[in-house]
Image (cartoon, coloured by chain):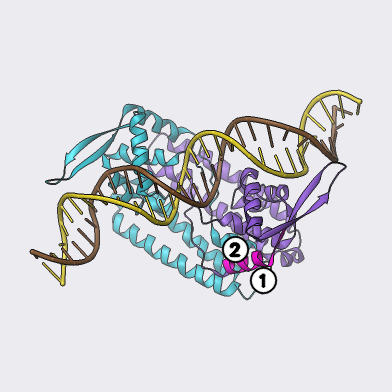
Chain colours: A purple, B cyan, C brown, D yellow
DNA sequence: TATTAACATGTAAATAATTACATGTTTTTG
DNA sequence: CAAAAACATGTAATTATTTACATGTTAATA
């Protein structure tokens, strides 16, 4: 969907923490952020260019190897302003695009032969995701103290875990 | 995002229930389906044309008024086959794009002055949605018998209600 | 009966996102 | 030290989605 340029705000938010390269940003979507947003490098690099033109970010170069020069992007005052403004705006509740739910909608009979396998498959997938999230929680927030530092990340992870738990509960109910 | 043509399958699924016009399909996204997918008429009409070319659907004309001729679309055997195939495929767990979660991720301090208002605003929005969903449930499934007919729709609505309930619970926890 | 709202169907332009194409560097490991 | 994996950065083509443009009909209502 043509979203409201939320990716731009994610990039601003990540750069607001610290300077990052395009590759760093791309990787962020494989781990933390990936839990609730996706983006490819082919979307990120052009957007960084555009955002730099709009003076939301700048970059400085880093000699990373004998031949490799990396661009590390930094947020500008303009960028910070836009980011803070976004944070304060009301958030739109996006519809979660869940393909399983979509399919379920079309299965009207409680006794459809498709149902049991579909539910089991989904249960397994969700259980795997839940395990992965719990492991993440263990790795990233081993002590109470660590939760203080990155409360945002902690809350989001906690939410994801709860979401998967609730999803599994619901799957048990419909079977 | 460039999804995997899920809209096509939604249309096939809806036409598999009964013949519908482009307008009927559009309206479906304002009510039931709208709970977990969005689409505009400007996306639907061209797609119907494309799907007809691909012989997944056909149409017949209905004289609806003295001047108004409506096209009502019907699923073809090809369309049914493709739809059934899709139903049987494993479902991908799409990431729910939740702007509030996104913002929360970037608020690291538990004592941020932004938090209380953000949470309250979100709580209110979710509560409103929950009320709306509960009303829908009452309207569409007033008796046990009605749940038997459209079990898919019932399950999905039940899921949406549970999701909002859980979301509210989580919002209470993070405040 | 004039106005408005809802019905009804399209196209165009712009933006967002995925997949594929393309290339080169650095680190790890067998 | 050769190969593979991971690092690193882009562009191109295609598809998906939204917003805006455009037009006409029918039903409800004031």
Question: From this viewpoint, is residue B56 visible?
Answer: no
A35 or A90, which is in the foreground?
Answer: A90
Q: Nearer the viewer, residue C15 or B114?
A: C15
- From the image, which quarter does the C terminus of chain A lie in? top left
Residue occupied by mark 1? B110
Judging from the image, mark 1 belongs to the subunit labelled B
**Which residue carries the number 2 mark?**
B103
Left or right of A171 in this view: B16: left
> How many neighbours does mark 2 have within 10 angstroms: few (below 14), some (14-19), or many (20 or more)?
many
Whether residues under marks 1 and 2 lie with C-beta atoms below 8 angstroms apart, the answer is: no
Residue B102 in picture, x, y percent from top left: 59, 59
Magenta residues: mostly which secondary structure? helix
* Marked residue nearer the N-terminal end (1 or 2): 2
Q: Which residues are magenta?
A: A74-87
**Chain letter for the residue marked with disc 2 in the picture:** B
Q: Secondary structure at mark 2?
A: helix
Q: From the viewer's perspective, is the residue at label 1 or at label 2 nearer?
A: 2
């Amino acid at each position: 969907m043509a979203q409201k340029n939320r990716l731009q705000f994610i990039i601003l938010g990540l750069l607001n923490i610290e300077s990052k390269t395009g590759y760093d940003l791309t990787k962020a979507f494989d781990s933390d952020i990936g839990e609730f947003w996706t983006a490819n490098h082919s979307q990120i690099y052009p957007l960084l260019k555009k955002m730099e033109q709009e003076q939301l970010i700048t970059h400085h170069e880093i000699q990373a190897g004998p031949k490799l020069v990396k661009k590390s992007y930094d947020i500008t005052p303009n960028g910070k302003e836009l980011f803070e403004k976004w944070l304060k705006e009301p958030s739109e509740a996006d519809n979660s695009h869940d393909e399983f739910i979509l399919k379920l909608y079309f299965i009207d009979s409680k006794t459809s032969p498709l149902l049991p396998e579909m539910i089991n498959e989904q249960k397994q997938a969700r259980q795997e995701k839940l395990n992965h999230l719990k492991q993440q929680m263990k790795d990233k927030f081993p002590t109470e103290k660590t939760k203080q530092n990155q409360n945002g990340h902690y809350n989001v992870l906690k939410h994801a875990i709860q979401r998967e738990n609730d999803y599994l509960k619901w799957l048990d109910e419909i079977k």
